[in-house]
Structure formats: C-alpha cells, structure tokens
Image (cartoon, rainbow, N blue to C red):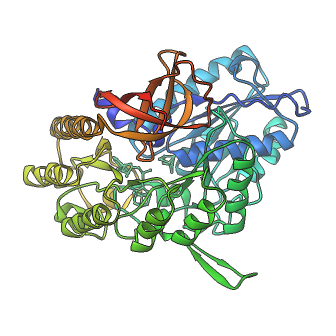
Amino acid sequence: MLDYVSEKVQNEKRQGEAFAPSFGEVETCGKRFYIESYGCAMNFADSEIVASILNKEGFGATRNIEEADLILVNTCSIREKAEQTIRKRITEFRKLKKAKPGTLVGILGCMAERLKSQLLEEEKLVDIVVGPDAYRYLPNLIDEAESGQKAVNVLLSREETYADISPIRLNSNGVTAFVSIMRGCNNMCTFCVVPFTRGRERSRNATSIVNEAKELFENGYREVTLLGQNVDSYNYFDSAKNETISFANLLKNVASISPLLRVRFSTSHPKDITDDVLFAIKEYENICRYIHLPVQSGSTRILQLMNRTYTKEWYKAKIDRIRELIPECGISSDVIAGFCTEEEIDHQETLQIMEYSKYDLSYMYFYSERPGTLAEKRYEDDVPEEIKKKRLQEIVALQYKLSLESNQKDVGKTFTVLIENDSKKSDADWMGRSSQNKAIIFPKENFKFKKGDYVDVKVNACTKATLFGKIKLL
Ligand code: SAM
Ligand code: SF4
Ligand code: F3S
C-alpha cells in the first residue's frame, strides 16, 4: 500500500502510461515511435509536444512496443522509487533491442536531465538522452544515434516554452486536456529535485496559451488544466500590448473563451496564491472550485527547513481565506512524512493541519533524499525508514477518513458534472467530475447524453474515493 501511495501521480495520471496517439491520417516515413511517460502532469504534457515534433518528422506512433523503431521513456526523478521503476523498464527495453537490432531507445525528461550522459556512456542502457528543454533537437539526435554517435542534449534554457508547438493529444478522452503555461521552478524547496531537472522558471506567451485553449474548445474539448510547478507566479510581459499578464488575468482570459469550457489549474504554492486568483474563481463559474495547495508539513520548524517560506499559521490563514471567499471550494494537498529531523511532535502537527484543512484528497509520500538537492547537502536524512513509513500510514489513514467525511457531506446534493468517459466498471454508467474535481459515477439510463456534455447529478451514495448518483433533470 505504501508504494502505491508514495508513487501516486498527480492529476490521476498513471505511472508508465503508454500513449496511444491516433494520427493515422498523417503521412509517415515508415518509422514508428512508442512513448511511455512517468511522473507529473507536466511530463505527460511534454510527451504530447514530443509526439508533435516526431510527427512533423514523419514518425508514426504505435502502442505496440515490439513494432517500434524508436522507444522513448519520459522520466521522473522526484523520488528514488520512481527512478528505480524506470531503470527496470529500460532494462526490459534492452531485451527488445536485442530481438530487433537497430531499434533506438531514448530517455527523456527529469531523469535524463539529472543523470545526463550516465545511462548512455557508463551504463550503455540507452542510445539517446534528451533533457526537458531540448526536445526540438530530438530529430537531430535520432540522426546522430542512427549513425552511431553519442546523442545527448541536456542543455537547460531560460526561454524555451514550446509555445509555438501544437501538442498532439495522446490517449485523450477528447474532453479534458493539459495546457502548459510555464516551465521550471525558482523555489528551491530543499527536498526537491525539480529546480535542477527543469531549470529556471519561465512563463509562456499568454496569447499562445489562450489560442491553444480556444483550439481545444473548437475541437470539442470542454476542460483545460493550466499546468505549472507554481502557477501563481505566472507572469508574462506582452510587449505588443505593453502589459503584464498575471495568473489571475490569464485565468480570466482562458475562462472567457466560453462558459462551456471548464478551467482548472495546478499547482498553487501557498506563499503565492493571491486574493485576485480567488476572486477570479468566484467571478467565473467555469473556473473550477478546486485548489491543489500542497502543505508538505504542518510544523513551522520543518517548513523552514524545507524552505517553503510560509508558517503553519500562514497556511491556515490561506485555507480560511479560501473557505471565506469560495465556501464550496474543494482543496487537496501534498504531504511528506519523515523529512530530516522530523520528530513525533512535528508529525502530530502535520496530522493537525490536515484535520484543520479538511482536505478532500492528498498525495502522500515519505521523504526520499535526492542527490544534489539542498536537503541532501545541508541535512542528514535521519528519520529511520520504519518511522517514515509508520507516519505515512497514519497520514494516509487520516486522509482516508477526511475524504470519506467530505464525500458523505455531498450525499443528497446535486452537482453539475462534465461527462468524461464510460465508468471503468460498466459501460452502462458514465464517469464525470464535479467542479470540485470529485469523480461521480451515474447510470446513463435512456438519456442521450454523450462525452463532453454537462449534466446535473444528484449524489445518493459514496465511498472515500467516489461519489455515486443519478441524473436529475432540472
Ligand atoms: N510544485 C509543486 C509544489 O510545490 O507543491 C509540486 C512539486 S512535486 C512534482 C510533487 C510533490 O512531490 C511535492 O509537492 C512533494 O510533496 C513531493 N516530493 C517532492 N520531492 C520529494 C522528495 N524528495 N521526497 C518525497 N516527496 C517529494
Ligand atoms: Fe519542487 Fe518546491 Fe518547485 Fe514545487 S515549488 S517544484 S516542491 S521546488
Ligand atoms: Fe517528476 Fe520531473 Fe515532474 S521530477 S514530478 S517529472 S517535474
């Protein structure tokens, strides 16, 4: 159970998802690529950019790894376990390569950036290494690898946002899509490898974001999630209009495309989320009532060691403000158990802040020391593993209780649900989400609704993970 929890991926993406793009209509050079993605939503969004770059080069996509000429794995370094899983997977690719000589294996993303040429030169596990800011060079790197050269590009950029590349939607339900609004992170939380693997923060051209969302809407999509490691610090200077666009402005611009387009965003840093953002949510019904506000720890002492730059009291005040301005808002969090020097008293404060915040959902992990991070350099990873796991188990148990309580409060209420798909268990049922990001399952009955439609659903039962209901015609 702990592994599952510690490796759970944000935004409901699964680890190691193989993409099934459908661009049969595009002319190919006869070569096929297969791509598998790990990590956060930003990595999944990046794989869609990579698919677009390869597609322009005439590469077709395949879901069948055995028929691929190019096997790509978009990787994550956030915890040691994530890297171990990927290493195992790359070793399996080696076997496929033996069976089909000439197949190229490429590693992309954060692990490629962290380990640089190590997996190619020392371990000889891959043929191509590409960091997150170098995807435009992938076609050149493929040529180099084909001619037997070492194909590595892990240069980080201060400007690259891939703003002009129109992502090819992979494994899409045709209703919801990710839109990257920025890259990198300047925050330097001491536990975190992301500033080293993704580089400096930069905001994407606001017009290109709005245009991408518009195009999605015109193609039938009904929900976009604006992605960044710290969306509240989005800041773009539009020189043509001589104006600076803040995250709150961007949210409003995207929400103005159509009231039928839902807008979500992730992730918000508690130190940066502003009242302007909360007012934007309040003003626009189609900006979802849901905020992912990772707390990490409930102890001010630990938060300081983590360099989160807020205190327990500051965080609680943010929760209060959200509840005051948007009482119906869903709130979720990330929590780390067993950070350096954490004592039982700090852990109890984490449990207390979770109770206080009444999270609908949390992503929970035990601390995994990452090479090169500030915590690795400054502090000792001194909480024994069994204590980390015990504390994580308590955190998970508490979150399960909070999730169930939150869902039980929804029984009897009616929510407007955006239909995303058939329910996994039965194609007689729909699965959709409320504005608060809760999954709701309900029978299709004889109504002629389809994916992408909005429907009112009255909740009549729940588990800790799911609401169940019935269509209610108003
Ligand atoms: N930028 C977001 C933020 O500030 O919350 C998310 C960053 S990270 C992709 C997602 C989560 O992974 C973090 O919020 C944190 O809880 C967790 N995480 C990051 N580094 C970790 C580590 N070394 N050990 C355990 N969990 C970690
Ligand atoms: Fe990592 Fe902190 Fe940046 Fe999030 S805000 S990506 S946790 S450094
Ligand atoms: Fe992992 Fe990189 Fe995302 S380390 S969580 S894939 S930014």
Which picture quadrant has residue 193? bottom left
Q: How many marks can you see?
A: 0
Query: Is 222 placed above or below 421 here?
Result: below
Q: Residue 24: x percent and y percent?
A: 84, 28
Q: Going 79% across and 25% down the picture, which residue do you hit?
A: 102
* Front residue (pair 355, 37): 355
In the visual, does 396 lie left or right of 139? left
Q: Going 40% across and 47% down the picture, which residue do you hit?
A: 436
Query: Is 80 placed above or below 183 here?
Result: above
* Front residue (pair 415, 70): 415
Residue extending furthest left?
345
In the visual, does 219 lie left or right of 305? right
* Front residue (pair 384, 450): 450
In the visual, does 245 lie left or right of 48? left
Q: Residue 46: x percent and y percent?
A: 64, 47
Q: Residue 279: x percent and y percent?
A: 43, 69
Q: Residue 462: x percent and y percent?
A: 30, 28
* Front residue (pair 369, 403): 403
Query: Can residue 290 be seen by looking at this rendering?
Result: yes
Query: Can residue 151 be seen by looking at this rendering?
Result: no
Q: In what quadrant of the picture does the N terminus appear?
A: top left
In the visual, does 306 lie left or right of 279? left
Which picture quadrant has residue 98? top right
Q: Going 57% across and 66% down the picture, which residue do you hit?
A: 252
Residue extending furthest front?
474
